[in-house]
Amino acid sequence: MLPDLLPLKPYLRETIWGGRGLATHYNKPLPDDVPIGESWEVSAYEDMESIVASGSLEGQNLRDLAQTHGAELLGQSVCDRYGTEFPMLIKLLDARQDLSIQVHPNDTYARAENLGTYGKMEAWYVLKSDNGRVAYGLKDGIDKHSFESALKENRVGDAIRFFNVREGDVVFVPPGTVHALCENVMIYEVQQSSDLTFRIYDYNRPGTDGKPRELHIDRSLDVLNFGEHTPEPKHWTELPDATPEHTLLAKSEHFQFERFNPTNEIEHTYPAFATLTILNGQANLKGLDETFTAQTGDTFFITANRTVTVSPQNKVEYLISTIP
């Protein structure tokens, strides 16, 4: 029988825009002298999988577990829709520099162009912001022609909306939305299990190989949603039915994620698998046979249809993501 809870060890990804914040704030064991921008907390993406950190399945990766255990691990509704191909990716991101201005395709485009099974829908929860901002959506009146002109004249920033963000802000990024995480912002990101990114503008900076990173202008123009107004980022306290103890942050056809800040013991049960990441504080997590003391930065996988009890040991904030 599968455990109710699987503590996960992330895949750490080097990026030119990353830093050391994931070690400082979330206790990630970063390699020395390497800029790490992404901690892939829950990943079955090939060669970038997260690994079970302890217990009876220690050392096994999430991709193999999903393919081996199917509905028992993921939930029948997930397997009915996705098979045993794991559909979700959870990351923590640390932007010490601006990320590229970019856009993601939807599933239809990805499959039609033989780029993979999934496009990339995502949502962010802002963890830290030192007077930071995000690029999010096009300015009113920007059409394909005016955007192409901005590209040619090296004034892409004039066509894009930028928003200052603070800790606790939520940003929903459907496919086709131009966006970028900017310097001095850290986020939790839930997304489809895809690494498809079309770069529009990258500040003419070199990649890790010393050469300019590839741009994908034609593909970006193919998938950009021109004329679609994007809402401003919202703080979790502004969302419908928000309470200090629980808030539904975002829900889509591909994922939902929630914020919890309980003062008393609380039980969680989901028909699909779920993931739990501690953002602040400490709690005991108890399944049927095991109890873990979870600290800031820890992430756990919750097996489908299992009940996990969270007992706060002090003030604790955590996020749970699942498939609706």
Image (spheres, rainbow, N blue to C red):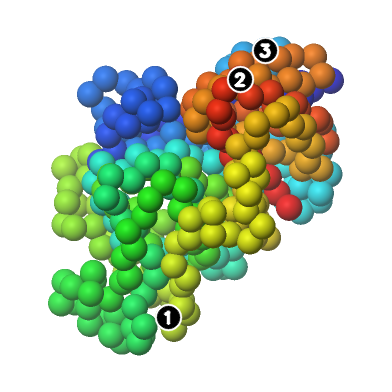
Badge 2 or badge 3: first in the primary sequence: 3
Q: Position of residue 303 (x, y in %)?
A: 75, 31
Report the amino acid beneath label 2.
Answer: Gln
Q: Position of residue 306 (x, y in %)?
A: 81, 31
Q: Determine the CA span between mark 2 and mark 3.
A: 22 Å
Badge 1 or badge 3: first in the primary sequence: 3
Rendered image quadrant of residue 156: bottom left
Q: Where is mark 3, residue-wise?
A: 55
Whether residue 51 is visible to the viewer of this picture, yes or no, is no
* 75 sits to left or right of 6: right
Rendered image quadrant of residue 308: top right
Q: Are marks 1 and 2 in contact (CB under 8 Å)?
A: no
Q: Position of residue 197 (x, y in %)?
A: 41, 56
Report the amino acid beneath label 1.
Answer: Phe
Residue at image position (74%, 14%) is: 290
**For the residue carrying disc 1, how many other residues have a C-alpha within 10 Å: few (<14), some (14-19), or many (20+)?**
some
Residue at image position (42%, 27%) is: 26
Please say if 64 is above or below 138.
above
Question: What numbered label is drawn on residue 57?
Answer: none
Report the amino acid beneath label 3.
Answer: Gly
Badge 1 or badge 2: first in the primary sequence: 1
Q: Total of numbered circles in the picture?
A: 3
Please say if 174 is above or below 271.
below
Q: Determine the CA span between mark 1 and mark 3.
A: 49 Å
Q: Are marks 2 and 3 in contact (CB under 8 Å)?
A: no
Q: Determine the CA span between mark 1 and mark 2.
A: 48 Å
Q: Where is mark 1, residue-wise?
A: 226
Q: Closer to the camera, 14 or 247? A: 247
* 145 sits to left or right of 236: left
Q: Where is mark 2, residue-wise?
A: 313
